[in-house]
Image (spheres, rainbow, N blue to C red):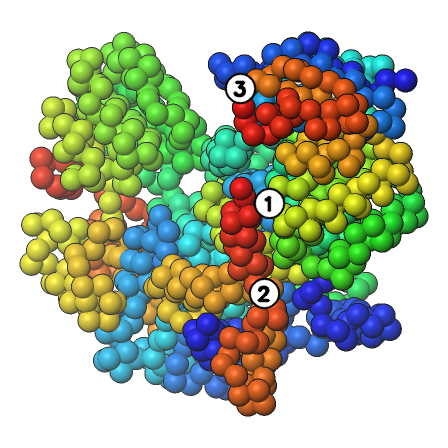
Amino acid sequence: MSTVSPVLRNRSARIALTVVVAIALIAAPLLLPAFANQTLVRIGVYAVAVLGLNIVMGYTGQVNLGQIFFVGLGAYVTAYGVNHGWNIIVVFVAACAIAGIVGLLVALAAARLGGLAIAMVTIALPIVGVPLAKRLSEFTGGSQGISARFSDAPDWSGLYSDQWQFYIVLLVTAAAFLLARSLVQGKYGRAFGVVRENEAVAASMGVSPYRTKVLAFTIASILGGASGFLYLAAVQYTSPETLSFGHSISLLAAMVIGGAGSIAGSLIGGAYYVFVPQLTNAIDPSFTTLSQGAILLVVLFLLPEGLVSLPRVIRRLGRRRTARPTSGNPPQTAPAHHPVPEAAREGLENTERQDRP
Amino acid sequence: MKIRTKPGGVLGIVAMASIVALSLSGCTRGGSGQGGGSGASPGITDTSITLGITTPLSGATAGPGTCTVAGVSAYFGAVNAAGGVKFGDGKTRTVTIKSYDDAYDPQKSLANFQQMVSDNVFAATAGLGTPTNRAYRDAAISEKFPQVLVMTGDPLFSDQKQSPWQLGFVPIYQNEGAAFGKLLAASKDQHKVALLSQNDDYGKGYVSGFKEAIKDASNISVVGEQTYEATDTSVDAQLTQLASSGADVFFNAMSVTPLTIAALQKAQQIGWKPSWFLPSNTSSPTAILEPGGAAAYPGIYSVSFAKAPQSPAFAKDPDVVKFLSELKQYGNYPDMPAFPHCMWSYMVGATLEQAFKNMTSPTRDSFMTALRNIKGLQAPLMLSGTSIDTTVDGQPAVSSVIVQKYNGKGYATAENFG
Amino acid sequence: MTLLELADVTAFYGPVQVLDGVSLSVPEGGSVGILGANGAGKTTTLRAVSGTVRTGGRITFDGRDIRGLRPDQVAALGIAHVPEGRGTLGQLSVRENLLVGAYLRKGRKAISADVDYCLDLFPQLQDRVSSRAAALSGGEQQMLAVARAFMAKPKLLLLDEASLGLAPSTAKTVYDSIRRLRRESGIAMVVVEQNANLAFSLVDTATVLETGRNVLTGSSAELKGMDEIRRAYLGG
């Protein structure tokens, strides 16, 4: 709540803003060039994957290094369904459901383990997934991958394919984000937060850490599957490379950069995932790894809570600048009113230690 | 706290950078006529033509990927310095190369392709990787965008009906298997062959090419056939099985380097010493044959179509000397090429130049027509006996390979088996 | 009628026996204190009830054997634990902390009414309701921990060292509010407390533990001022 500016607290302003954003999103693909639409489509794909990761890692605090596996699984299910002529709604449901069921089964086993053991299990997923995808060539097309086209614009729509894909992605992404938002703001979201912070306290309030972790992991997998469906809508092709382990790490970096434990941060994370390679390609294609690493470090150094905290930081800086000439006080007076949470926590531990007999 | 007042500027840069990235996408729908004359395709003007390469420049396959850019850049760098290419429509143009890193990620190669469209690139070429090339194949077809002379052994790219805007460059797996089969069939002696292959399209391609070539040869019999999975860590069981077949020729269609070394060691351990055939990508003298102790075998055969610059036999070859100096000067690649892709993409440059010379109008259609009509072109660095032939449907630009035999140091062309 | 009954409860931390046959009886709506020196087993007794340590012996709640249940199962039966060190969820806001306490409850209106009740009970929390709990002072965090436990509408509240680390005046404020809470809600309580005066202000009966065993049990009136009590607190 603290990140929302006072204007947004006003209910009618909020509704107006929502309407404006909705209209902008619906009109955008008609006005933007194709490449911009294609870029936005990919942002949607990865925003949903990062959103899932955020549910299980950002909100529930469980390390998950296997999110890309569920994206790949969703993509393969989609490709299989499309190539077998299933109805597209059925394909979508299957992509989410199969990813969710696999996620549930993995979580039932993995959530019994603590901390690093979960991380190990999730690392294993993409590592097993790649050779598995190569071997099950009947379903996956082997190492050459599999194409499936369902997202070309139908003739009656009068749209270009990039516009049509935009609307598919917009529909699914918007639904995923709205559902996730109401989830994390509600009872289960609070349960995620308690489990992340203190499992013992969670249990003492009737929140089963085990079930909560399984729930978070399963939701993350379902969102991974949905992202895989969108991946196929955008790329129309998938191969074992799609679920390679490195992409899982990139997703994780995108989540942290966007803002762990933030719904808006997931969207920013998706944008980061897509934009940064384009940006670094523009700088110098031979040094993409180097410049990506540099960008990552710069963002984390300046905004440890992710890009989503940028408005807050700018506000703080702005306030300090305006405060200086009038008060004439040294700059440290301004931040004192807006304690950084880390600093506050640190201070608190100090008092506690001092108070102990 | 003082530090905190600074970031505004840096943040500004980050923000600017994202704006730049966004504006890079600028290009209105339909790619409005950037051509020099009326009816010209995007990416070609009266004085220049722009080619795009999406290839892995970072990650595990960055080595060969970097080579694909370096070779083409080296070739056209020298051509541009000499004034450019005189196209079939009478105009002389310089060639601009734009490279894009896809890190072997299909999703990124598609994004790069979309960016090429928006950057007004005329054609995509030389990119390495089967999944990455497949990822934008459909998009290239619907955009009527040439995706040619790409580095993949996947036959799909050379099937004109399915891939009207594509053409592969390097031999498909079948070509390599067939070359060895032919050499064997021409032998005067009787041979018993054992086959071991990777259980995927790679291994299957080699085996089917080989079997096709020996189909009518009465002197060759396949006495044992085994497969393994690309993820297996040992093929000892298969080797023992095959050794008991008494084969004197061992066709090992294996793509995994450590496994190939282990197989070379294991076979001599169990006292089986046949002649070997190894695919071009797992036959490196220094990386595989020496550690595997290949000298123990009567013969190690592989295939190639490019002169190897590191081989003493070609040290003074004029092609090689010119290639190495251009690679250094224009390809930003000062070292001895570590991967054959440097040579291959240099040949891609020569093939493209030939197509440019023959295209009669500045359109992609005309380019494809010209490209599909090259026959018998002996591109620089090609081994004698191989040539570019783009006219055969179902075959990549290079389908002829030369079987070579290991001589203890490097490879030399093998005229016949034995 | 007895709500909670511990009979001959034992517990080990590794090879060390911390409870050696503890017994305790809490009537419905009653309030029982556990007194004793550091290491006597007071906190472990509470943890035995809430299911966070494995125990021997018999623990019944509401006529049901609860020994061996998981903590979340125990909580679901109506036992809320205010742990030592408060267990504040620092990243959650004060309001979220309170709502988490009501995790197992249904009925939005009643929950919302109880949040208001808690803020009335602990007015200091009123102003901080949207801030992160990590930014609260120690006393406020303790209040929040008690309020959060109350939000579960438990039948029994386990209160562990609510005065720990607080200034005496703050501790008194906290206990005043807890007394009011008890008066108005009738929740039964088991109270572990180092400060005897604070403890006796809240409990009807108490038991004194020494090295994991009951050494003395009686009403607050009987126990107040007895030598054993003083000895227990001085560590004798």
Q: Distance of mark 2 from mark 3, alpha carbons?
A: 40 Å
- In this rendering, does residue B182 appear at all? no
Give the residue number, with chain letter if any, for mark 2.
A339
Disc 2 secondary structure class:
loop
Location of residue A191 with respect to A295 vertically, above or below:
above
Give the residue number, with chain letter if any, for mark 1.
C165
Q: Distance of mark 3 from mark 1, alpha carbons?
A: 25 Å
Location of residue B142 with respect to B288 vertically, above or below:
below
Q: Mark 1 vs mark 2: tell me if same chain.
A: no
Mark 2 — on which chain does it sit?
A
Amino acid carrying label 2: it is Pro
Amino acid carrying label 1: it is Gly
Residue at x-position 19% and y-position 23% = B265
From the viewer's perspective, is A65 left or right of C83?
left
- In this rendering, does residue B245 appear at all? yes
Residue at x-position 27% and y-position 82% = B83
Location of residue B246 with respect to B336 vertically, above or below:
above
Instruction: Report the disc number at residue C176.
Output: none
Given residues A165 and A215, the one toward you in this image is A215
Q: Indicate which disc, 3 or 1, sits on the residue closer to the N terminus.
A: 3
Amino acid carrying label 3: it is Tyr
Disc 1 secondary structure class:
loop
Give the residue number, with chain letter if any, for mark 3.
C13
